[in-house]
Image (spheres, rainbow, N blue to C red):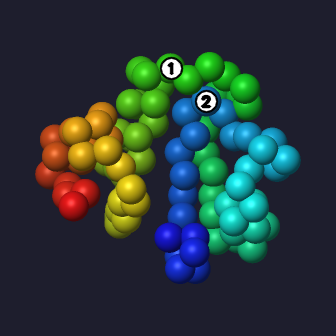
Amino acid sequence: ALAKGRSVIQVVPQGIPRESDMPSMLLNACREGRALLISPQPSGSRLNKKVATWCNEYVLRHADEVWVGDISPNGMLSSMLSRLGLSAF
């Protein structure tokens, strides 16, 4: 999505990374106002599956539009999309 110039919102369950740790494409998109990172935890928090699930489900339930990038076909996010009646493929 970033390579195509689309705006994105990325849920980061383990905290928003420092600018020096972000991929350049994401950092540039944030600086240009095309990317927004949100997280319920401070940077450096340990990834917690329960928090990650909650974050993803919260965003999916409240979004008006969802674009899904590369995800594992049998992973947690794919299962969540199916359960919410959304399609990833």
Tell me if I can see residue 87 in this picture: yes
Q: Nearer the viewer, residue 24 or 12?
A: 24
Work out whether 32 lies above or below 59: below
Q: x, y (%) of residue 43?
A: 73, 31
Which type of secondary structure does the marked residue at label 2 adopt?
A: loop
Q: Is residue 14 left or right of residue 18?
A: left
Contact, mark 1 vs mark 2 (Cβ under 8 Å): yes
Residue at the (57%, 70%) spot, across then down? 2
Question: Callout 1: helix, strand or loop?
Answer: loop
Answer with left or right where residue 76 lies relative to residue 2. Answer: left
Q: Earlier in the sequence, mark 1 or mark 2?
A: 2
Residue at image position (69%, 65%) is 25
x, y percentage for residue 61?
32, 48
Tell me how far mark 1 sits from mark 2, CA to CA. Answer: 7 Å
Indicate left or right for 67 with 34 as reference: left
Q: Residue at x 64, y 71 (%)?
A: 34
- Tell me if residue 51 comes above or below residue 79 in the rendering: above
Q: Which residue is mark 1?
A: 48
Residue at which label 2 appears: 14
Give the residue at x 53% y 45%.
11
Q: Quadrant of the C terminus?
A: bottom left
Query: As shown in the figure, which amino acid type bears the numbered disc 2?
Result: Gln
Q: Quadrant of residue 78?
A: top left
